[in-house]
Image (cartoon, rainbow, N blue to C red):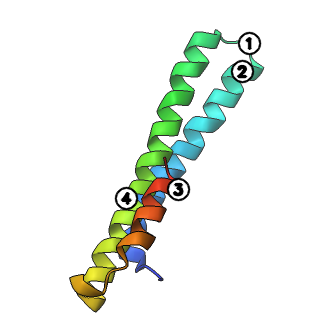
């Protein structure tokens, strides 16, 4: 399923922000920052990426229901997508 660009613009923005944040974590490690500080920031990056993934699945679900109706949604496939993010 191909999502509309308008539907995923906020997801792309979120993931780009996470990408920049990850670059900052890498820079922190290269510069010898405290391990605890780097891990805290890395946890934030991980959470941001996960939220982007969940938002992507949710957008796909909304579009799928709108296009085909609730009865046609493959619940097992959607469950597998959600679990792939766990």
- Badge nearest the viewer, 3 or 2: 3
Q: Cβ–Cβ below 8 Å for labels 2 and 1? A: yes
Mark 4 or mark 1: which comes first in sequence?
1
Q: Cβ–Cβ below 8 Å for labels 3 and 1? A: no
Q: Cβ–Cβ below 8 Å for labels 3 and 2? A: no
Mark 4 or mark 3: which comes first in sequence?
4
Whether residue 13 sits left or right of residue 27 in the image: it is: left
| Residue denoted by label 3 | 84
- What label does residue 55 carry, if any? 4
- How much space separates mark 4 and mark 2, taking CA atoms? 29 Å
Q: Residue furthest front?
A: 76
The x, y position of residue 55, in whole percent, is 37, 58
Q: Residue at x 61, y 37 (%)?
A: 22
Report which quarter residue 42 is drawn in.
Answer: top right
| Residue denoted by label 1 | 32
Mark 3 or mark 1: which comes first in sequence?
1
Q: Residue at x 45, y 38 (%)?
A: 47
Mark 3 or mark 2: which comes first in sequence?
2
- How much space separates mark 4 and mark 3, taking CA atoms? 14 Å
Mark 2 falls on what kind of element? helix
The x, y position of residue 36, in whole percent, is 58, 11
Q: Residue at x 41, y 70 (%)?
A: 76
Q: Cβ–Cβ below 8 Å for labels 4 and 3? A: no
Mark 3 falls on what kind of element? helix
Q: Residue furthest right?
A: 30
Q: Residues within 10 Å of mark 4 (few under 14, many from 20)?
A: some
- Vertically, is 81 above or below 34? below
| Residue denoted by label 2 | 29
């Amino acid at each position: 399923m191909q999502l509309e660009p308008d539907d995923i613009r906020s997801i792309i923005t979120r993931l780009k922000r996470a990408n920049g944040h990850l670059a900052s974590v890498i820079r922190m490690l290269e510069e010898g920052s405290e391990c605890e500080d780097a891990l805290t920031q890395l946890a934030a990056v991980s959470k941001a990426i996960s939220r982007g993934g969940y938002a992507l699945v949710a957008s796909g679900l909304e579009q799928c229901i709108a296009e085909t109706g609730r009865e046609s949604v493959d619940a097992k496939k959607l469950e597998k997508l959600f679990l792939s993010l766990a």
